[in-house]
Amino acid sequence: MHILFATSEARPLIKTGGLADVSGALPVALRAIGLDCRLLLPGYPAVLAGVKDAKPVCMLNGLPDDTVATLLEATMPDSEVPLYILDAPELFQRPGGPYQDVAGHDHPDNVLRFAVFSKAAALLASSDSPLAWRPDVLHCNDWQTGLAPAYLRLAGEKTPSIMTVHNLAYQGIFPPAELLTVGLPPESFAVEGVEYYGNLSFLKAGLYYADRLTTVSPTYAEEIRQPALGMGLQGLLTSRGDDLVGILNGIDSGEWNPTADHYLPCKFSSRALAGKKDCKLKLQQDLNLEPGRNAPLFGIIARLAQQKGLDLILAVADGILHRGGQIALLGTGEKALEAAFRDLGAQHPGRVAAVIGYDEGLSHRIEAGADIFLMPSRFEPCGLNQLYSLRYGTVPIVHATGGLQDTVEDGVTGFVFHEPTPHALWLAVDRALTTYADTKAWQRMMRAGMKRDFSWEKSAREYESLYRELLKPA
Ligand code: ADP
Ligand code: GLC
C-alpha cells in the first residue's frame, strides 16, 4: 500500500511543534509494518540543507499563480523514509521560520505558499501525476495541506484522502478574495465547501472534502464536536461524526530513551534510577539553580501560547517556591509570556530558570532532570511532552483535556486536575508535593509511568486499518 504523507514539518529537518515529531516518526512506524509511506515537505532552506542526496525528478505544472516548482527526491536523514521535496525557491527559500519572518510576522504570501503545497500533494495523488510512484491514499496534516482534498475532489479524482487535525486552533484563514489566488471554483465558497464565517479556511476545506478525518487523541475527537473546543467547526465535525476518529500519537522511543539518550550526562532506567538524580544535579548546575537533590524541580517545555495554560503556572509559581520548589522553563512564543517568565527568573535567581529559546538538547535534559512536569494546557489535542515525561520518570501534572486526559492516570502515573483555574492547579501541585515527600510512593509513581508503552506501533496499526477501509471496493 502506497501512502503519501503530506506535512509542513518533520523532524529532524524542520520543526515548530509536535507535528514535526509525529511526521518524523509515524511514517517510520508505517514502513515497519510493511506500508510504503513517503513524505512530502516544502523546500525550506533547512530541509534542503538537511538532506544529502536530493535530486530533481520532475517539474510540477498547473500550480496556483503559475508557480514553477521542481519535485526533488531524497531520503530522511536518520530513517531512510523516502522524501519528496517541493522546491519552489521564491515561496520557500527565505529567512525566518516556516510560517513567519525573522521578526515574527506571518509571511504575507502564506495563502499562496500553502495553496501551492496543497496542490502539489493533490497532483501527486492524481491520475495525471508526472511521477511514476502513485499513492493509494493521500494523508494530509493540518491546515497547510487542507486544500489538497478539495483540489482532488473538485477535479473528480478518485484517490481517497485523510485529513488529520493536530490542532483545530490553527486553520489557515484568509480573506474571500484569495479564492482566486488558490484557484478554486466560486461554487466551492459555500458552507458546504471551503467557506468559514465569510472567509476561506484551508482546514475547513480539508475537513469538508477529505474522505476520512482523524485527530490525535480519542478525547480531542469528542471535544471538537462541542462548541467549547470546536472553533466554530463543531457542526461540520458532528455531521461528519462517522468519518472522524481519534488515534493517539506515539513517541519516538529511540529518540526519547533515558537509557541511551545522547543529550543526557547520565543514563537511567526504571530499575536504575540513580542516573536521574545526577541528571538533576547537572541540570541545576547548568541553569544556575541552587544545587540540591531534595528540592522538587518543576520542568516546563512549551510553545509560549495561550493554549498551554502558562498563566496558570505564573499564578501558582510563588506557592511552588514557598514550598521549596524550583522551576526550569524552556520556551519561546508570545512576547508577553516570554517577558513574564523572564521577570520571574530575575526575581528568583537560583530558584527559577527561564530559558527563552528553542533548544532540543536542553529539552531532553529538562525532561530527564526535573522531578515534576507541568502541563496545564487549556486544551491539548494530544501533547507529547507529558509522554516524554512519563518515559523519563518525571511525574506530570496535567489538566484533564484531550490527549492529556487519555495518557495520564491520576494518582498512578501523574496528577490530573479538572478545572483550568489556578486553584485547581494548586491543589494538584499540593498533592504532588505531598507524594514527593514520601520517597517510596514517589518512586512507585515514577516507575508506573516509565513502564507505560506509548510506542508508535499500535497507532500505526490503527492508521493502517483506516487506509484499508478506504481502499475497500464500495
Ligand atoms: P505542540 O505541538 O502543541 O507545541 P506537543 O507537546 O505536541 O505540543 O509538542 C511539542 C514539541 O516541541 C515537543 O517535542 C517539545 O519538546 C518541543 N518543544 C516545544 N518548545 C520547545 C523549545 N523551546 N525547545 C525545544 N523543544 C521544544
Ligand atoms: C499539535 C498539538 C499537540 C499534538 C501535536 C502533534 O501541535 O497542539 O497537542 O501533540 O500537534 O499531533
Image: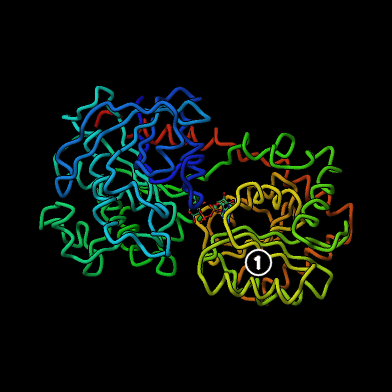
The residue singled out by tag 1 in the image is 417
Picture coordinates of residue 216, whole percent (x, y): 48, 49
Of 342 and 295, the residue lying toward us = 342
Residue name at image x 48 percent, y 36 percent = 26
Which quarter of the rendering shows the N terminus?
Answer: top left
176 to the left or right of 22: left
- The image shows residue 267, relative to residue 146, as above or below, that is above
Residue name at image x 65 percent, y 39 percent = 453
Of 396 and 464, the residue lying toward us = 396
What colouring method underlies this structural image? rainbow
Query: Amino acid under label 1?
Result: Phe
**Numbered label tally:** 1
At numbered mark 1, what does the secondary structure look like: helix, strand or loop? strand
**Crowding at mark 1 (Cα within 10 Å: few <14, some 14-19, many 20+):** many
Residue name at image x 32 percent, y 47 percent = 92
Residue name at image x 34 percent, y 57 percent = 237
Picture coordinates of residue 93, whole percent (x, y): 34, 46
Picture coordinates of residue 318, whole percent (x, y): 74, 77
132 to the left or right of 351: left
Picture coordinates of residue 379, whole percent (x, y): 52, 63
Quadrant housing residue 49:
top left
Which quarter of the rendering shows the C terminus?
Answer: top left
- The image shows residue 208, relative to residue 231, as above or below, that is above
- The image shows residue 281, relative to residue 177, as above or below, that is above
152 to the left or right of 332: left
Quadrant housing residue 456:
top right
Of 278 and 256, the residue lying toward us = 278
